[in-house]
Amino acid sequence: MYKRFIVKLTEEERADLQSMVKTGKAAANKLLHARILLKADTSELGPAWSDEQIGEAVEASTATVQRVRQRFVEESLEAALHRKQTPRQYVPVLDGEAEAHLVALACSHPPEGRCRWTIRLLTHKMVELQYVEHIGRETIRLALKKINLSLG
């Protein structure tokens, strides 16, 4: 099978990867990717195994072997060793001010006809009072748990 991404390690890169694998003092994923690169090496010192052989030897799928190969060729050794970071940014729904309003609301008297606040009531009241645009019950529950506030 034709390999589109050919791995050629320098002597220094090869020595670093071998010492990493030999000591075993790294994350399991990093060690797996190091073993893949060592087996895929097509330089004079490398075995130049096929993706299927490497996959069987290190117990990884051929897709993983291909991805590691590709990241090494297109980016760098470091990029091939580490997992790709997710570009997602999570914006918290409750900031400090909204959390303070939640605590004040939970500590206040419950609505007419109720003996206590429920998470569902707090959720609806937070939106009704426009402290937040929308919020889920789980977010309210986690916020109350974080500040160690029990509704019961």
Image: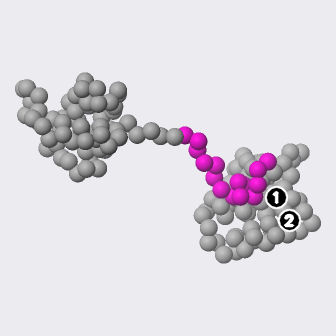
Query: Marks 1 and 2: which is nearer the front?
Result: 2
Q: Earlier in the sequence, mark 1 or mark 2?
A: 2
Q: For the point 26% across and 30% down, which residue is it? A: 126
What is the magenta segment's predominant secondary structure? loop
User: From this viewpoint, which residue is outermost toward the front?
Assistant: 97
| Element assignment for label 1 | helix
Q: For the point 24% across and 37% down, which residue is it? A: 101
* Residue 83 x %, y %: 63, 52
From the viewer's perspective, tell me whether residue 141 is left or right of residue 46.
left
Q: Which residues are magenta?
A: 74-88
* Residue 122 x %, y %: 22, 33
Residue 13 colored in magenta in the image: no
Viewer-closest of 5 and 90? 90
Task: Identify the residue position indicated by label 2 in the image.
Answer: 10
* Residue 116 x %, y %: 11, 36
Q: For the point 40% across and 40% down, which residue is it? A: 92
Location of residue 20 with respect to 63 vertically, above or below: below
Location of residue 126 with respect to 71 vertically, above or below: above
* Residue 56 x %, y %: 73, 57
Q: Is residue 141 visible?
A: no
Q: Amino acid at mark 1?
A: Ala
Q: For the point 65% across and 61% down, which residue is it? A: 30
Viewer-closest of 52 and 37? 37
Task: Identify the residue position indicated by label 1 in the image.
Answer: 40
Bin the neighbour count of mark 2 within 10 Å (Cα to Cα): few under 14, some 14-19, many 20 and up: few
Quarter of the image where one finds residue 8:
bottom right
Q: Amino acid at mark 2?
A: Thr
User: From this viewpoint, which residue is outermost toward the top?
Assistant: 128
| Element assignment for label 2 | loop
From the viewer's perspective, tell me whether residue 65 is left or right of residue 149.
right
Query: Which of the colour schemes (rainbow, by chain, secondary structure, one colour) is used?
Result: one colour
